[in-house]
Image (cartoon, rainbow, N blue to C red):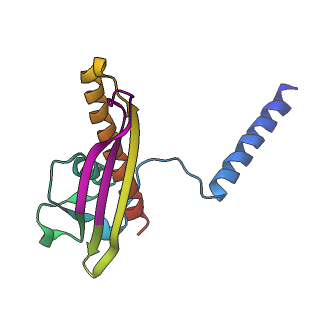
Amino acid sequence: MAAPARWSRCALLLLVALAASSCGWRLQGIERLPSAMSVTYVDAADRYSEFNRALRESLNAAGAQLVNDSSQARAIIRVRRDESGQRVLSVSARNRPEEYEVYYIVEYSVEGVSGELLEVQMLERKRDYSYDEAALLAKQREQAVLTQALARELAGLVLRRLAAL
């Protein structure tokens, strides 16, 4: 009795795995880049921004070799805009901020040896958080953490677009 139940569970598991793989589903993880991106140069005005750091880490994890000279690269990622900040979303009756929105905007393009691989793309991500004057330091830290998370998310989006080239 136990053996048929075990076989039916195994068959069901195999059927689910087969169905999931046939529809193109796969675990999210590190993207593999095409050979055109194997040696990459990142051209950015601010080499120390949250997005630039996250993009470089993602490219390294995906197997790209980052070079410091654009003449050695097979692909150049041009970060044309790298902007983050916050805006007031709502205020109290006493005209004090109650809610903020943290945003991160990136514009980039990709050039290869033979020409433009990806035209100028703009990506924007936003998150909001409540504000409390009594917890000022905690809220400043929350804003910094949200900015880092948005930069990592944008770098992941860029990497997925590069992997699709």
Q: Position of residue 161 (x, y in %)?
A: 41, 62
Above or below, 13 against 46 in this view is above
Q: Report the front residue among 72 and 11.
A: 72
Q: Position of residue 51 (x, y in %)?
A: 26, 50
Q: How many badges with numbers are in the image? A: 0
Residue 156 visible: no
Q: Report the front residue among 21 and 57.
A: 57
Q: Residue at x 39, y 46 (%)?
A: 126
Q: Quadrant of the N terminus?
A: top right
Extreme-top residue of the structure: 134
Q: Residue at x 36, y 51 (%)?
A: 154
Q: Quadrant of the C terminus?
A: bottom left
What range is drawn magenta here?
80-108
Magenta stretch: helix, strand or loop mostly: strand
Above or below, 38 against 2 in this view is below
The reply to whether the magenta stretch includes residue 100 is: yes
Extreme-right residue of the structure: 1
The reply to whether the magenta stretch includes residue 111 is: no
Residue 131, by quadrant, is top left
Residue 89, by quadrant, is top left
Extreme-front residue of the structure: 93
Q: Position of residue 69 (x, y in %)?
A: 11, 65
Residue 134 visible: yes
Q: Residue at x 37, y 54 (%)?
A: 124
Q: Position of residue 79 (x, y in %)?
A: 23, 62
Is residue 40 toward the left or the right of residue 20 in the image? Answer: left
Q: Residue at x 14, y 69 (%)?
A: 70
